[in-house]
Amino acid sequence: MRYPYRGYVTRALFAMAVVFGMATGVRAADHFGERVGPGARLFVTKTYPGHGKLTEKDFRQLADAGFTVVVNMWLEDVPGYCMGASKAGLAAMSWNLGMADADKDERTDRTVTRQGKTTRYTLPFSPAGWAKVTAQIAEQAKLSRTYPNFKGALLDFEIYDENSTDGFCETYDDATFTAFFKEMGKPVPNPLPQADQRRAYLDKLQVLTLYVESQAKRVGEQARTLRRAIDAINPSFQIGVYGWGAFKESIMRNVATDRAPVIDLDATLYGRTIWSNAFEGGYDADEPDARGLKWSLVTAAEMSRDARHRTYPAVLLSGHYPQSPGPGDGTQFRFTVRQSFNSAAYADGYWIWTDWAPPKPWTDKQQWIDAMMAYWTEANAALDAGDWTWSIRQKDSVANPKATAPKVIVTTDGKTVLAWDPLTGRKISTDKPIVWTAVNPSAGKAKSQLRIAGWSLRSTQSSTADPYEVGHGVKAMAMGDVDAQEGDELVTLNGGWIKIWDPASKCQLLRFYVGAEQTDVRVEDTLQ
C-alpha cells in the first residue's frame, strides 16, 4: 500500500499539534507517523548553501518546496537541527559513515583491498569498528526520544580512501586470509600468497565465494548487534544504507525490522543514463530527456518493486544528483526534478544529493539553489495534487532526434467517443464527433496476448509468465506506440484511469483520469 506524504496538509496539522501541546503540556504528536516509507522525499543538506548549517529560512525553503525529510550531513548540533526541521514541519535524519577509521597504531585491524593495498578503515566485520559506529547511532537514537521528528540514521558505505575497494566488500589481510583456511580445516598456504594475488588464488581453488560469504556472515552479526542496541532505545528508529559491494545486502537484512524498515538509498539514477567510464564525469550529458526519463522511471519502478518482494522490510529510494553532466546552460536540475517526480509518482520516493560548487555557468550557489527549489515546489505540489502527468508535460532540454509520432488514445462510454493526448493526459478537442472504428487492431493485438484476471493481466500464451499488476477495475486494454519512443506500449482502462505500461518491465509509465463512465479504450493512428 502506498501512502505518499501530503506535505502542505501535514505541516498545517503539525502546527496545530504544536500549539495544542504548548497549551496542554502534552508533547506534539509524531507528525509523520512511525516511519519514513514510500512517498518520502529526502534532501541531504551537504551544501545548503554552506557547510550544512541551515537557517530557519533554509528549513522553510525545503519545506515549502515539498520535501518531507531533511538529512543532516555533518552532525553539527543535531538537537538544533531537529528543532529547526520540526518548526518547518519536516522530519529529520542524519548521514553517517558506516565504516570506522582504524586506530593509528592498529596494524592488524585494517582492510586490505584485492589489489593488496591497505586502507584507513577497520576490517569490515571489526568488533572495534562496529562498536564505534554503534555508539554513535545509539546516541542519535536517544535523541529521537526527545525529538520525535528525528526518524533515523543513514549509513554511508562508500569507500572514501585513496586505496578504494569495490564498495563495502571483503578484506585480504593476513589474519583474515589465514583464519579462513583454518575454518575450513585446510592447511594454511605457506608461504602466503602476496596480498594482491590472494583473490585469484582463492578463485583458482574455487573457494572465493565461500571466502566472501564467510565475511558477509560476520558483517551481518555486527549489523544485528547494532539493531539490538537501537531497539533497546527506540525500536522505531530507522537505518538507511547507501553504497554498494558484497556486504550491503547482509547489512540491510540485519538492520531491518517490521517497525523500522531499512531504507535502501540507491544511486543508480544520478545521471541521464547509468554511470560509465565512457563519459566525462561518468554520465552522458547529451542523452535526450525523454529517453533518460523513461530509463530512470522504469529502473526506479523495477527496483522499488523488487524491494517490496524482499524477505525483510525495505523501502527503496532512488537517488538523484542535479550536478551530473547535462545541458551547457546549467539546467540539468530541471531534468533531475522531473526524475525525482517520477520516482515519487511511479516508484517509492527519492533522495537528493548535491556537491560543493554549482554547475557552470552558475556562479552564485544560492541563486542555483533557489532556481531548483522553485522547480521542486512546482513538482512536489503536483505530486500532492495527484497530477501524475506533470513531468511529461514539461519542456525538454535535450530533444529526442529519434522521436516517433505518438498515436491517439480514444475511450468511449458506449455513446460518446473521446480522444486523449497520451503525452499529457489532456482531452483533444475536435470539431466533429469521433468515429469508433468497427475494427480495432490495437485492442485485438492486446487481447490476443493478454487476458483480464481480476486485478491483473495474464499472458494468453504462457501460464508461467509474470502478470501485469494493473490494479482493480480493469475494463479494457489496447496496444500501440503512445510515448513518442519506438515500440508499442500497453494501455489499460481501470475504473476511469488510463494507465500506460512498458511491456518489457511491466512498469507503469503514466496514468491520468478520463472518467468512471468510460468502458472501452483503443489506440488510433490518427483521428478520423
Image (cartoon, helix red, strand yellow):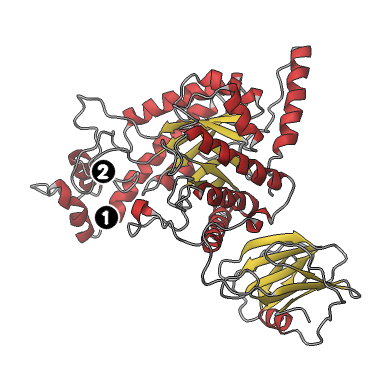
Q: Quadrant of the C terminus?
A: bottom right
Is disc 2 placed on a helix, strand or loop?
A: loop
Residues packed near mark 1 inside 10 Å, few (<14), some (14 to 19) or many (20 plus): some
Q: Residue at x 46, y 39 (%)?
A: 354
Q: Which mark is residue 221?
A: none
Q: Which residue is mark 2?
A: 171
The answer to whether residue 259 is above or below residue 198 is above
- Could you say where residue 174 lies in the image, as x and y percent from the top left? 17, 40
In which quadrant of the rendered view does residue 500 lie? Answer: bottom right
Q: Is residue 497 above or below residue 258?
A: below
Image coordinates of residue 387 in percent, x first then y, are: 72, 52
Would residue 313 be visible to someone looking at this image?
A: no
- Count the numbered circles shown: 2
CA gap, disc 1 and disc 2: 12 Å
In-image side of 376 versus 251 (left or right): right
Front in this rendered view, residue 236 or 32: 32
Q: Residue 208, which numbered label?
A: 1
**Side (left or right) of 16 relative to 133:** right
Amino acid at circle 1: Leu
The three-letter code of the residue at mark 2 reads Thr
Nearer the observer, 330 or 277 = 330
At x 81% / y 63%, what residue is drawn? 514
Q: Camera-side residue: 28 or 212?
A: 28
Can you tell which of label 1 and label 2 is closer to the viewer?
A: 2
Q: Secondary structure at mark 1?
A: helix
* Apparent side of residue 183 relative to residue 257 in the rendered image (left or right): left
Residue 267, position as x, y percentages in the image: 46, 48
Instruction: Farthest residue to the right: give it.
Output: 415
Residue at 48% in and 21% down: 139
